[in-house]
Image (cartoon, helix red, strand yellow):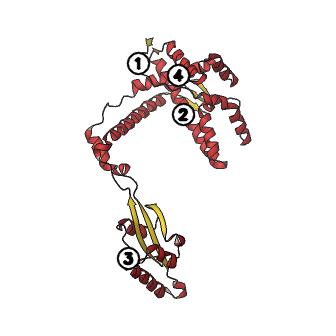
Amino acid sequence: MRLFVFTTLTLIGLALPALSQATREAAARSDAGEPEVVDGIAAIVNGEVITVSQVRMVIGPRERLLRQQYTGAELQKQMQEVRKSALQDLIDRQLIVQSFKKEGFSLPDYFVEQRMSEIIRENFGGDRNTFVKTLQAQNYTLGQFRKDEFDKIIVAAMRGKNVKPNIVASPTRIRDYYAKHRDEFTSKEQLHLRMIMVPSRSLEGNAAAQKAMAEEILGKLANGADFARMAQMYSEDSTRDLGGDWGWIERKTLAPELEKVAFTLPVQKISNIVELGGNYYILRVDEKKGGVTKGFAEVRSEIEKKLLQEEAQRLQNNWLAGLRQKATIRTF
């Protein structure tokens, strides 16, 4: 059997606060009308069982968050998605551990003992008895905890062995990404808008008079009349009392015809009359901000990191897909 030795590991410990919440989670499930299952088989992976309680241990913190955000049918939908994702993660972990053993690797026990010592020191002030009692209070044995940590170390090691993206992304790929995704590096374009709306009252036969009024307002504005005052006197939209002040807006806030005018209008300039939906609009942009794209040199390292992460994810997906294809997996 080969000894699996590595110098750098990404160790992910079990979220211990979730252990102390198990009883409350069971009560919450009862309050929500969900049947309480003591335990059962969630999946079988090449003959090895994954239990319902293992899935619950993983999803505890996420379930609590969902219960704060959703209710009813939407809560049930979100919970099912979380449980499905957690089960798949556990299946993948099982496959990786099985692959580790199949390849004849072994892991020194002191790796796990070191990890447990870190957890006890960081979460329990170095008190091992309190740590053990916390596990026991939730029907979680020290042996189970040690196995989970052992498996997590194996998973980290096997990922390091099988998922090896290139150390650097090619300059051409980085440049191409920047050219195709400039919007990712462009701040949101916003403007501070004021607007006057004059309804046509066409059903009352007053369309001509109302348009004449809009033209009169535009003339007064051209001669220096205060826009806010004109809006308070003549506008008939919801911002009338605010002097036609729409505040800061982004694209897709207005109807396309008005958006086009607003976002091409120079600051402090007044638009021509815009006729839309039987109404007459006059716009003024007080300020603009955003719409600035960061230079390539400024974001190059960010793009390179993103490309390497995407490559690592692709390699991991391919690796896991290969393990799944060779496995016999049953879910319940």
Residue 128 is situated, as x and y percent measured from the top left of the image, at 62, 17
Query: Could you give the CA–CA distance between mark 1 and mark 3, rounded to whole angstroms?
Result: 70 Å
Query: Could you give the CA–CA distance between mark 1 and mark 2, rounded to whole angstroms?
Result: 29 Å
Helix, strand or loop at label 3? It is: loop
- Label number found at residue 7: 1
- Label number found at residue 86: none
Q: Which of these two is toward me, 67 or 186?
A: 186
Foreground mark, 4 or 2, reads: 4
| First along the sequence among labels 4 and 2 | 2
Foreground mark, 2 or 3, reads: 3
**Residue that mark 3 sits on:** 272
- Label number found at residue 151: 4
| First along the sequence among labels 1 and 4 | 1
| First along the sequence among labels 1 and 3 | 1
Which quadrant would residue 314 be assigned to in this image? top left
| Amino acid type shown at disc 2 | Gln
Residue 312 is situated, as x and y percent measured from the top left of the image, at 39, 33
Local crowd at mark 4 within 10 Å, few (<14), some, or many (≥20)? some
